[in-house]
């Protein structure tokens, strides 16, 4: 009997067995992982978006190693924390103040506390089916929950959290008509954990305008998308001016580090000590060292080339599956995208929940795993690319997807118009 609950410490890591075997990873380098039996896989989960420079990037390892040797937990202010905050603030626009935390969930929790303290209001609004951390308050309405799909006039809410529908312009207006106690609205550049549902043109700016008009703040949850499309915050590129943002994942290349960044006046309560914050490991030397080395590496990386490789892979996947009679669409960006068993990508969570096929996603995961590529088995899963996913790796991935498409054709494929089936050919 295993002493580890469910075999893992986070439910997102649970994978189906393949040929009766469970998967346990031993090492990772570049774009690849190796299991305990020495089998190599191209990785597309990449720490669920955290590993952007590639696994075990030497510069990051060396920087973290030096910090670990100096002192893992010096308790007091240390020499790496200020430089790390300064380095991060170069990329966050008017949000110049930084507080480090250890995970994206912690960062969103602290950002919500900041918004409540600044506005004197109680409730945080989040996107239905969005993932803004696993803490009780913001996990309300997560993807696949009963609350995530709601009708007009039946908005789910708790004492401290309420929901709104992503890409529904009118629902934002209704939210503030119904509830004057909104401290902040959390927005993501896209609804990533619901399968990379893209924001409709102008939607995010509309949410911001309505929130600010009603005295509420805007929290940009950039834990997943920050630094993934370019060296900076995606919300700023989309023309937003958030009051607070949360960042994590890619800023440490797999080392646990996250942060809340915000305008000085919004975070002043923390500066003055009137709003509670803490965390033994927040801003620890290893996290700060990882951030400094990672940001330096990201600044020197060719985002445009990586995005082009990803867009080429997306087109290949759609064409290859179509050739096998399987209709798929992809949604997202070249560096992070989802695969849908449908003719078009969903525009809303309502559409996504109808399109989601656990059977297809599991079968695709197993077929690709057999071919040496690891993808998430969830219908709302995502494929990430790192800067170590170079042209040679992409060629291997295309071969694996071609094999997977061929193996899935018998179950999920439909003959193209004019193509004879085996039965018609033998009649």
Image (cartoon, grey):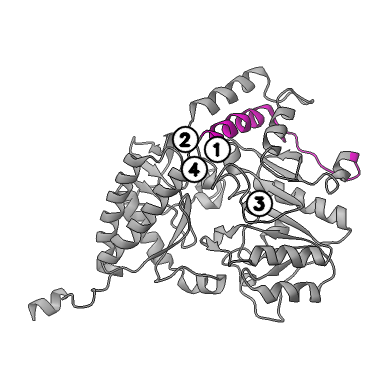
Magenta region: 272-300
Is residue 72 visible to the viewer in this orientation of the structure?
A: yes
Secondary structure of the residue carrying tag 4 is helix
The residue tagged 1 is 254
Secondary structure of the residue carrying tag 2 is loop
On screen, residue 9 above or below 131: above
**Image point (40%, 61%), residue name:** 361
The residue tagged 3 is 236
Rendering coords of residue 122 (x, y %): 84, 61
Q: Marks 1/2: CA distance?
A: 8 Å
> Badge 4, how many Cα within 10 Å: few under 14, some, many 20+?
many
Judged left or right of residue 210, residue 139 is: left
Evaluate if marks 3 and 1 touch, with contact meaning CB atoms under 8 Å apart.
Answer: no
Q: Marks 2/3: CA distance?
A: 28 Å
Magenta highlight on residue 3? no
Q: Marks 4/3: CA distance?
A: 17 Å
Judged left or right of residue 71, residue 359 is: left
On screen, residue 233 above or below 73: below
Q: Marks 3/1: CA distance?
A: 24 Å
Secondary structure of the residue carrying tag 3 is helix
Viewer-nearest residue: 170 or 110: 170
């Amino acid at each position: 009997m295993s002493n580890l609950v469910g075999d893992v410490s986070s439910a997102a890591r649970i994978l189906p067995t393949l040929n009766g075997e469970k998967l346990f990873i031993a090492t990772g380098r570049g774009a690849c992982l190796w299991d305990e039996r020495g089998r190599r896989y191209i990785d597309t989960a990449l720490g669920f978006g955290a590993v952007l420079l590639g696994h075990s990037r030497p510069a990051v390892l060396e920087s973290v190693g030096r910090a670990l040797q100096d002192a893992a937990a010096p308790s007091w202010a240390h020499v790496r924390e200020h430089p790390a905050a300064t380095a991060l603030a170069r990329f966050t626009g008017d949000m110049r103040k930084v507080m480090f935390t250890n995970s994206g969930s912690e960062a969103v929790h602290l950002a919500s506390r900041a918004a409540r303290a600044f506005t004197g209001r109680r409730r945080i609004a989040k996107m239905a089916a969005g993932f803004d951390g696993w803490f009780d308050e913001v996990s309300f309405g997560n993807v696949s929950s009963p609350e995530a799909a709601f009708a007009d006039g039946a908005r789910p809410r708790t004492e401290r959290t309420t929901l709104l529908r992503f890409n529904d312009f009118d629902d934002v207006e209704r939210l503030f008509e119904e509830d004057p106690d909104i401290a902040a609205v959390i927005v993501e550049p896209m609804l990533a954990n619901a399968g990379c549902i893209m924001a409709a043109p102008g939607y995010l700016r509309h949410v911001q305008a309505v929130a600010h008009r009603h005295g509420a703040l805007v929290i940009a949850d950039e834990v997943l998308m920050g630094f993934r499309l370019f060296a900076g915050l995606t919300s700023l590129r989309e023309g937003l001016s958030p009051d607070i943002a949360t960042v994590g994942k890619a800023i440490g290349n797999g080392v646990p580090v996250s942060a809340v960044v915000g305008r000085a006046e919004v975070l002043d309560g923390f500066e003055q000590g009137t709003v509670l914050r803490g965390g033994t490991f927040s801003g620890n030397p290893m996290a700060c060292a990882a951030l400094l080395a990672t940001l330096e590496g990201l600044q020197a990386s060719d985002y445009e080339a990586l995005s082009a490789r990803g867009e080429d892979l997306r087109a290949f996947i759609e064409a290859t599956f179509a050739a096998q009679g399987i209709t798929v669409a992809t949604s997202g960006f070249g560096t992070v995208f989802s695969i849908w068993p449908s003719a078009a990508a969903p525009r809303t969570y309502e559409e996504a929940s109808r399109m989601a096929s656990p059977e297809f996603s599991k079968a695709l995961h197993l077929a690709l795993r057999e071919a040496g590529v690891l993808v998430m088995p969830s219908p709302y899963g995502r494929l990430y690319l790192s800067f170590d996913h170079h042209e040679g790796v992409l060629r291997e991935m295309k071969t694996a997807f071609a094999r997977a498409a061929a193996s899935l054709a018998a179950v999920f494929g439909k003959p193209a118009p004019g193509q004879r089936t085996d039965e018609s050919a033998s009649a």
